[in-house]
Image (cartoon, rainbow, N blue to C red):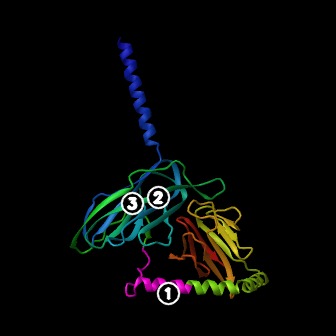
Amino acid sequence: MKSVNAFIVASILTLALIMNVSAQSSESIWLTANTTAYKTGETVVVTLNAASATLIQGFTFQIRYDPACLKPTNASSPISGMNGLPLPQLIGLVDGSYASTTPQAINGVLAEVRFTALKGCQTNLTLESAALAIRNASGFAAAVTGVALGEKNVALNIDKEVVQSQATQPVSGALLQLTPPPPTSQGIPGWLIGLFATLLVAGGVFVIYKRLPHETTTVQKNSTSSGAMARLQIKHGPQAGKSIAITKLPCQIGRDPVNDICLNDPHVISQHARIFAAQNEYYLMDLGGETYVNGQVIRKSSAILRPGDVVRLGKSALFVFNS
């Protein structure tokens, strides 16, 4: 009888150990805060955490916030060797990305993210997306599979009492600036701005359409004669790390394989954008997706591309234009 009882106890302990090991080895990312009560002017600090059995070489995250209540300032990571990669920021969405040259073990804090409380309000911070990254056999960044998002929301209560902001000591590591673009001027009625923008875009598209065939040939001839060729340096998303030469104009970019440059990203639409030339300049035209140049949204219109301009398609496909 004693041997039977001992066997049962041993079985229970073994099962508990297996379940514990399984729980510890699960890949997950979650958002926390040490405190959720602040006063206007104080620095709000939230923590991005992760547990992973895989050694990583980078991570990304996007946190949704209310720009009327909070203003993001910076983030820092305590993981040795992790360096912040500056990305164009959108109002209302913090976009953070870190990378390391050597694999790192993680089981705790990935990054601390800081905001300034702007006024009294009750608001939430929401972890929209997050990913852990490794370097695959080809040397390119690849997402760790099977990573689950745990707690995604942090509720904040900001008192309307104004206090002087006190600097909080960040965790060790390089700071990543998260400054959003300046807000749109409030002095002009929104309908008037919209009307002006519509007329401007329509006029610009018409001029480009009329001039495109002749001017495209001119730029291609100039590029060929000088030996120079425009290139896209892929910094984030599919094909990260690649340098892609633009061998023809116009150059179609999108998720569909028939495009000149195919980016297999769920947030990139089938025909997302087009690079073309006019008046000895390169232009980027949005074809209906989310398209940004240096953090400024381009909606079904075009913008001049200068060397060093940062272009983002969708939420994560990022490249730098060079000519």
Where residue 97 appears, as percent x and y from the top left, is 49, 64
Q: Position of residue 252 (x, y in %)?
A: 68, 71
Please tell me which residue lies in front, 187 or 219. 187
Q: For the residue marked with disc 1, what is the amino acid? A: Phe
In the rendered structure, which amino acid carries the disc numbered 3?
Answer: Thr
Q: Position of residue 44 (x, y in %)?
A: 31, 66
Q: Amino acid at mark 2?
A: Ser
For label 3, the SS is strand
Which of labels 1 and 3 is toward the front? 1
Of label 1 and label 3, which has the lower sequence position? 3
Q: Residue furthest left?
A: 161
The foreground one among 318 and 9 is 318
Q: Name the foreground residue: 311 vs 144.
A: 311
Residue 83 vertical position relative to residue 274 in the rendered view, above or below: above
N-terminal label among 2 and 1: 2
Local crowd at mark 2 within 10 Å, few (<14), some, or many (≥20)? some
The answer to whether 189 is drawn above or below residue 121 in the figure is: below
Distance of label 1 from label 3 (alpha carbons): 35 Å
- Asked if the residues shown at circle 2 and circle 1 are in contact, with their CB atoms under 8 angstroms apart, the answer is no
Local SS, label 2: strand
The residue shown at (44%, 69%) is 176
Which residue is at 71% across, 64% downward? 258
Q: Read off the residue under disc 2.
A: 129
The label on residue 126 is 3
Q: Where does label 1 land, which residue?
A: 196
Nearest-to-viewer mark from 2 and 1: 1
Stretch in magenta? 179-200
Q: Residue furthest top?
A: 1
